[in-house]
Image: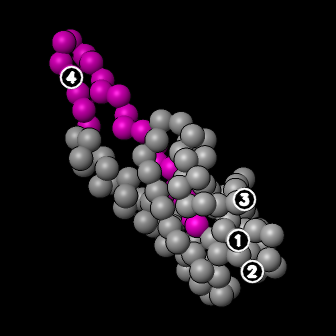
């Protein structure tokens, strides 16, 4: 049956329900899990009076996104671990989360995607 589930999460209460379901499903079928977080794309700079305003650099934004992803994914990994499920984590910055989720499923050889 299923061997590796990809659970897409953003840390919201609704996606927490998907995580809970993915863990229960993984337990039932003896699968492992990959928790995945797609961070929003770098915000476009604002222009005013010929001046470009970027609140943070792309490099700084990538660090902030990685920190946010780590918080969300660590929670999922801890829940999975306490349920006896092997859980890898992954994240990316993406303009289109659905494309990132599909790419992650392919990359991690997932045979089922669980999401809210």
Query: Which quadrant would residue 112 be assigned to in this image?
Result: bottom right
The image shows residue 53 at horizontal and vertical percentages of 23, 27
- Asked if the stretch drawn in magenta spans residue 104, the answer is no
Q: Label 1 vs label 3: CA separation?
A: 9 Å
Q: In the visual, does 84 lie left or right of 104?
A: right
Q: Is residue 87 above or below residue 40?
A: below
Task: Tell me which numbered mark, 4 or 1, is placed earlier along the sequence.
Answer: 1
The image shows residue 11 at horizontal and vertical percentages of 57, 60
Label 1 belongs to which residue?
Answer: 3
Q: Label 1 vs label 2: CA separation?
A: 7 Å
> Does any portion of residue 58 appear in the rendered image?
yes
Residue positioned 44% across, 51% down in the render:
92
Label 4 belongs to which residue?
Answer: 52
Label 3 belongs to which residue?
Answer: 112
The image shows residue 71 at horizontal and vertical percentages of 45, 67
The colour scheme used to paint the residues is: one colour
Q: Magenta region: which residues?
A: 34-56
Nearest the eye: 13 or 86: 86
Q: Label 3 vs label 4: CA separation?
A: 43 Å
For residue 75, the mark is none
Report the number of numbered marks.
Answer: 4
> Does any portion of residue 20 appear in the rendered image?
no
The image shows residue 20 at horizontal and vertical percentages of 72, 70
């Amino acid at each position: 049956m299923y061997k590796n589930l990809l659970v897409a999460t953003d840390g919201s209460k609704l996606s927490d329900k998907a995580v809970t379901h993915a863990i229960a499903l993984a337990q039932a079928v003896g699968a492992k899990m990959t928790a995945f977080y797609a961070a929003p794309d770098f915000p476009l700079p604002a222009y005013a009076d010929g001046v470009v305003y970027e609140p943070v650099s792309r490099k700084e934004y990538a660090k902030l996104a990685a920190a946010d992803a780590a918080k969300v994914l660590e929670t999922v990994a801890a829940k999975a671990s306490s349920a006896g499920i092997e859980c890898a984590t992954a994240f990316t910055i993406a303009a289109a989360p659905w494309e990132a989720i599909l790419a992650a499923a392919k990359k991690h050889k997932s045979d089922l995607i669980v999401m809210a």
